[in-house]
């Protein structure tokens, strides 16, 4: 028997966040990330990519659910555990786990005591939520360059996370630059 998808509606995601005890700052942040992620999804889809909009919306809202417990680097992994405890879609758990920075390599995860798995975004939905999060500071949309500067100051310009951030930005810049003239409009 095929199992029903467990991706909650946006209203249910907000309810889950409140039940888990995230503070008002986190709630304002995830709402803004959700807004940016929807804009990014529409742009990516206009370039011919298929994106699960419901998954992105839920992932953007739940990406910082682990901040109900901690605000350190482990909030992604803890958030993934919360999503699994609630028996939500595994793809949501992966979005939550893989949004920190531009992902965390398996080696770094081991060093940070986050487990022995790669936490680098892989799917387009994971990448959209991760990137949208980097375009929001608190509840304000920011330029990617501001986020990159912050991470360079926090981690050092040679930290592997800086290269991953630059690669994530380049990934989206390439998609958004693509010529779309040969594609049929989506509304046909």
Image (tube, rainbow, N blue to C red):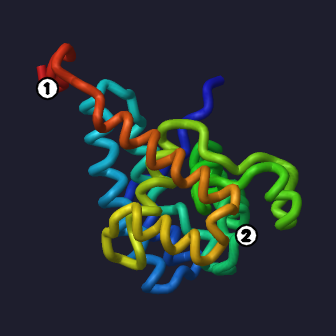
Neighbour class for label 1 at 10 Å: few (<14), some, many (≥20)? few
Q: In this rendering, would 38 be left or right of 83?
A: left
Circle 2 is placed at which residue position? 74
- Quadrant occupied by the C terminus: top left
Residue at x 33% of width, y 43% of height = 41
- In the picture of the structure, the residue carrying the numbered disc 1 is 187
Q: Residue furthest left?
A: 188
Quadrant in which residue 49 is drawn? top left
- Dot 2 lies on which element? loop
Residue 15 in picture, x, y percent from top left = 46, 70
Q: Nearer the viewer, residue 99 or 82?
A: 99
The reply, left or right, for residue 5 in relation to residue 94 is left
Give the SS element for disc 1: loop
Which label sits in the foreground, 2 or 1? Answer: 2
Q: Quick check: 50 above or below 135? A: above
Vertical side of 20 occupied by 53: above or below? above
Residue at the image position 73 percent from the left and 69 percent from the top = 74
Q: Residue furthest bottom?
A: 24
User: What residue is shown at x 27% (from left), y 40% (from top)?
Assistant: 43
Nearer the observer, 25 or 54: 25
């Amino acid at each position: 028997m095929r199992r029903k998808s467990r991706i909650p509606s946006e209203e249910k995601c907000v309810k889950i966040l409140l039940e888990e005890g995230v503070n008002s700052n986190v709630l304002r942040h995830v709402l803004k990330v959700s807004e940016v992620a929807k804009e990014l999804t529409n742009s990516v889809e206009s370039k011919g990519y298929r994106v699960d909009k419901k998954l992105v919306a839920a992932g953007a809202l739940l990406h910082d659910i682990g901040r109900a417990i901690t605000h350190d680097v482990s909030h992604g992994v803890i958030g993934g555990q919360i999503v699994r405890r609630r028996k939500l879609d595994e793809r949501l758990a992966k979005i939550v786990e893989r949004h920190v920075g531009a992902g965390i390599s398996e080696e770094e995860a081991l060093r940070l005591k986050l487990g022995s798995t790669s936490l680098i975004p892989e799917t387009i939905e994971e990448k959209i939520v991760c990137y949208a999060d980097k375009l929001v500071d608190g509840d304000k949309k920011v330029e990617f360059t501001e986020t990159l500067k912050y991470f360079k100051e926090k981690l050092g310009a040679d930290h592997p996370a800086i290269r991953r951030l630059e690669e994530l930005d380049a990934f989206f810049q390439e998609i958004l630059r693509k010529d779309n003239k040969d594609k049929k409009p989506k509304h046909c």
